Image (tube, rainbow, N blue to C red):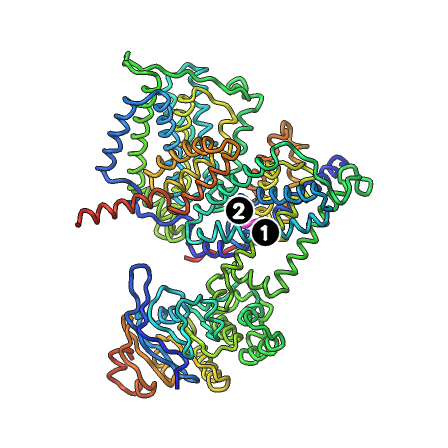
Amino acid sequence: MELFTNQVLAGIATGAIYACMALAVVMIYQAIDHLNFAQGEMAMFSTFISWQLMQWGVSYWAAFLMTLAFSFVAGIAIERILFKPLAKAPVLTNVAGFIALFAIINSSAGLIWDFTIKQYPTPFGSAPFLGSQLISTHQAGMIGVTVALLLALYFFFQYTRIGLAMRAAASVPESARLVGINTSWMIALGWGMATAIGSIAGMLIAPVVFLEPNMMGGVLIYGFAAAVLGGLSSPFGAVVGGFLVGVFENLAGTYIPGVGNELKLPIALALIVSVLVVKPAGLFGRQIVKRV
Amino acid sequence: MTPLLNVKDLRAYYGQVQALHGLSFSLNEGSLTTLLGANGAGKTTTLRAICNMVRSTGGVEFEGKPLNNRSTESIVRFGIAHVPQGRGTFTNMTVEENLQLGAITRKDSAGIVSDIERMYAHFPVLKQRHTQQAGTLSGGEQQMLAVARALMLRPRLMLLDEPSFGLAPLVVRDLFGILGKINREDKVSILVVEQNAQLALELADQAYVIETGRIVMSGNAKDIANNEEIRKSYLGY
Amino acid sequence: MSAAEEAIAEGHEAVEAVPKRAMTLGTGTSLVVLAALLVVPMFVKNFIIFQMTMLLIYGLAVLALNILTGGSGQFSLGQSAFYAVGAYTSAVLMEHANINYALTIPVSAVICFGFGYLFGKPALRLSGIYLALATFALATAMPQLLKLNFLEHWTGGVQGLVVTKPDAPFGLPMSQDMWLYYFTLAVTVAIYIFSVNLLRSRSGRAFMAIRDNEIAASSMGVNVALYKTLAFGVSAGITGVAGSLGAIAVQFVAPDSYTITLAISLFLGMVVGGVGWLPGSFVGAAFIIFVPNMAESISKGLSGAVFGVLLFLVIYLVPHGARQVAIFGQQLVGKLRKN
């Protein structure tokens, strides 16, 4: 039993990573209706920016805030320059664009900062949290930040005019234009916010997985999985999905014989797919009634 | 007097297909004008072209200011509220959020709050359901919501696309009564597109009849309603 | 409800409707292309012949995805798994059972068809992004499964298997590469003709009806479940054949040759070629074979970035892929004829 509780705890700790990424995924999905395959790379690049700032002597929190602002602007710029021209192109062409962006960012980061792994600091320290060996203060801090972010997003979307406008633009674009909302800018804003949230995820994850250009590959997949599991229309679902995926993954690694590190990912994904077969819109997603 | 809305030689296209062939008409401040015609005559396209939602050429002027080449969302800011066909409800938001969205371009939060109350007075059913998801409302209630949402803009001109579509006759009577009241009391000019010509002519003061993308008849609504020949050949009742 | 869900709910699928006539080339053009494919190898070096062989093989794999996505509107990131199963089927049969290479290909086709069909069953419940995730899971699992210890005796584990390249039969005076090229070409032409006819048949119309509007299709009496799984099966079967040919051409199979990267490449090939346009599959295959090499030669350190930029250029210029170029060319020829 103790093994079980410990594994669940450890799962929650890794789950915080996925939850954070899943929030960014849901954010962009709400704004643009696609999963952005380059999102992990964008987060990685932002994290490198903050690392570079710290190398130049900027303090952690100053670098954190500067990176947040940089990411927000960069996200908007990427949408305006690269993806706005593709707005009328087919969906699959847009997906190809995300893959192209992935290749560009990954390769550029490799050239600028090379592929050796780098230590990344944590503002929360890495002592055991409340005496538990399985969860460190950093991981506890990460869970805290994720929950705070979720609350902030909830407040933003429920109680601000711009949040309301963004939701309207995403759900019925034509009607949104008819009440005077500039839907094209709402999409750009969505990119900016998603990129900023992604950068937070990157900076929180980096102390755990170490900083290198390929650090987000696995994390993004789990983030996607978590978002899909929770229901792509629900930020709350994304966070719950993140923790569930973390726990799933750890329990599968512990209790299913012959599952090494290698098979953890496929098994976690297979479990998620089975959940989706039963609940196709995810655990907290809205079930859509189809009309002809 | 300059007309509130002046449409001149309007042509609209869907891809290669031309839907409007040089349509001209105008509408005076405070009037309630109806645009009649059969299915596919180009009524909806006319409203969409005014708001620049289809590719079009020709002149559309609002109080003498040209609207062509402006985006849909900036045309709304002139005070033109468009209730589209199918109502355009934000189905996954609450009734109250739908109303707030109608006023999203306004800055006066106190005015918005009092206007929401005014809408609830006009449409008591919306007040009962203000926290409900708008998608769960009935067709008639959603049409009320769409009109209320448009009014939240405090528009100078309201464009209504087939408000009677799919509604029970009694509900239509109700709705048209409210439209007349809004026109008289709130001084909102209205352009309403209808298939139900009889009802629209009872309500309107001015009428245009369009056929295959052209205006074929215009005049005082009562005169048209009383002219049996026109009624038979164009309006089919 | 987000706009995407709305779009799906309203029946606007991610794949545009392509009329079935527009999915292929005219007979005249096809014959010219075929003649060129027959003649060119006689005048070029062995390495180029090998690359042409690979182009046909990847072209087949992209074509298979095109039948699934462009034909029936289902999206898959798991094609690398079917490709791997095909490749290993041939390799194992050839190296462990000494079966002739040509005979392993129909076996691969059947095994992969069955695999795809079975996978398509649970996938029936999923669409769009959810299906992408499920197929993605399959693609990531496949290399790991091939590495499993208890399969190592047959699969060679991480090391993989070396496959013997066949000689030309009947004492034909041609190199192994050239023989394999013509062999691949024959298989490709056969599958291409099969695919064109499939899409023109009753089943093809059923695929497209499902792609354009699933609910309307089912209300017209199309057995949606059957045809969707069938599309998966056919697609997997063709991908398996491509995998077999690939294993023979490269003379080697190993788990890490068949990662998600392969599936993504095939997807890009489909987009560049034009979703739903079968001949475009081979244009797309050329893109995924040659453009990465080109990027590498432009800049070693930044090859990924160069590739990304080139890909962006292509999708800006022709967001509908090579199909758009073909339509444009057709219109141009039509105008010239008039004048």
Residue holding disc 2: A36
Please say whether residue C71 is visible from this viewpoint: no
Badge 1 sits on which subunit? Answer: A
Q: Amino acid at mark 2?
A: Asn
Q: Earlier in the sequence, mark 1 or mark 2?
A: 2
Q: Chain of mark 2?
A: A
| Label 1 CA crowd tier, 10 Å (few <14, some 14–19, many 20+) | many
Q: Secondary structure at mark 2?
A: loop
Q: Nearer the viewer, residue B59 or C30?
A: B59
| Marks 1/2: CA–CA distance | 10 Å
Up the image or down, C288 lies above or below B154; here it is above
- Using the rendered image, report if marks 1 and 2 lie on a common chain: yes
Q: Position of residue B54 (x, y in %)?
A: 37, 64
SS under mark 1: helix
Q: Which residue is mark 1?
A: A194
Q: Nearer the viewer, residue C149 or C136?
A: C136
Q: How would you rate the neighbour count of disc 2 (Cα within 10 Å): few for under 14, some for 14-19, many for 20 or more?
A: many
x and y, in percent, of residue C83 in the image: 44, 30
Residue at x 43%, y 73% (from the top left corner): B167
Find the magenta span and give its range.
A278-287
Marks 1 and 2 in Cβ contact (< 8 Å): yes
| C328 inside magenta stretch | no
- Count of numbered marks: 2
Residue C165's place in the image compared with B166, above or below, is above
Instruction: Identify the residue shown where x is 31% and y is 23%.
Output: C44
- Position of residue C27 in the picture relative to residue B4 (left or right): left
- Residue C12 in picture, x, y percent from top left: 41, 54
Q: Amino acid at mark 1?
A: Ala
**Image quadrant assignment for residue B99:** bottom right
Q: Is residue A279 magenta?
A: yes
The residue positioned farthest toward the front in the image shown: A56
